[in-house]
Image (cartoon, helix red, strand yellow):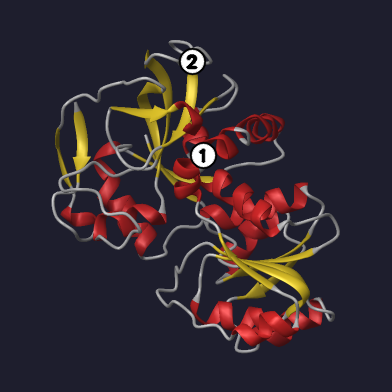
Amino acid sequence: MRAWKCVTWGGPNYLELGSVPEPECDAGQVEITVNACGVNFADLLLISGQFQVRPELPFVPGMEVSGRITRLGPDCEMFSLGQKAAAYVKHGGYAEKVVAPVSQVTSIPESIPLPVAAAFPVSYGSAELALDRAGLAAGEVVVIGGAAGAVGTACIELAKQRGAEVIACVGDDAKEAIARACGADHIVSSHSRHLYDDLREIAPDGVNVIIDPVGGIFFEESLRALGYGGRVVSLGFASGKIPSIRLNHFLVRHQSLVGSSFGLTCVKDPDRISAKWPLLVEMLEAGHINPRVSQTRSFAELPKALQMLKDRKVAGRIVIS
């Protein structure tokens, strides 16, 4: 079958389009014939060798797919052949077929287009897990970094579903429009030299929660605006800079810092992930959450799509179909 292969660590142009064996479908796994793939920032880290886990070369990247179930391993009675589905996989998604553990697969209503479904599992799974880790409650104020990105927009929508007040941190006017369309209550520029002052003007008593996929200066400045009992959830370091922290601030202000790893939780606590799919799919079908697919590219254009993501030339999601 056709697949994009990572044969050496590097950027998108190092990927090679070729042939790989069809995957084996073992107990507790389903095979999905892929119709569409979500393009994620984590894919860039994976193919460059900078992700938390480095697969053995060569491998097929791609973490997020949608399509039809075409094979069932033993112990997969909850699914049926021909069923529309979306899934998260560690890698292997940029191929004609992929297998995934049942805990990482969710059925998708026929009313949902497959390109939209392909932009759903990683972003909304990651966002819901992060908000759970934060314990975000109705009436609280949450700051979301990288708010126009895949996980950022999902965080905005899911935070609003929880009844929170959302401050979205974005980099330009196009991204501001996306954040507002997702329901953000306030917009703050990520390029502001006065991020702390901007946040405290909106929340004089301090914000309750910070969702941070950015790191660097954003972490340092937003942390200053965190109120008593506030919580920070670290999702990654898109800025390329891992910040240092002074623990005395967390001690004297009764604050918490936690990490949130969707991929690792799928392995270590799969039941926690599988339990989230029904509600997320229900919100998707009802239109309460909406993966914003701004571009759909052909399978042959994957390197170009990844390069656009790397160059931050994307507002919304890119999907390969």
Q: Secondary structure at mark 1?
A: helix
Which image quadrant is residue 112 in?
Answer: top right
* Amino acid type, residue under disc 2 in the picture: Gln
Q: Where does label 2 land, which residue?
A: 83
Marks 1 and 2 in Cβ contact (< 8 Å): no
User: Which residue does the image show at 72% across and 39% down from the upper left?
Assistant: 288
For mark 1, what is the residue? 121
Left/right of residue 152 with respect to residue 282 in the rendered view: left
Question: Which one is in front, 206 or 15?
Answer: 206
- The answer to whether residue 292 shows anywhere in this view is no
Instruction: Please tell me whether residue 205 is drawn above or below residue 302 in the rendered image.
Output: below
Above or below residue 156? Residue 271 is above
Which amino acid, mark 1?
Pro
Corner quadrant of residue 134: bottom right
Point out residue 223 in the picture as x, y percentages from the top left corner: 65, 79
Image x and y of residue 19, in percent? 13, 31
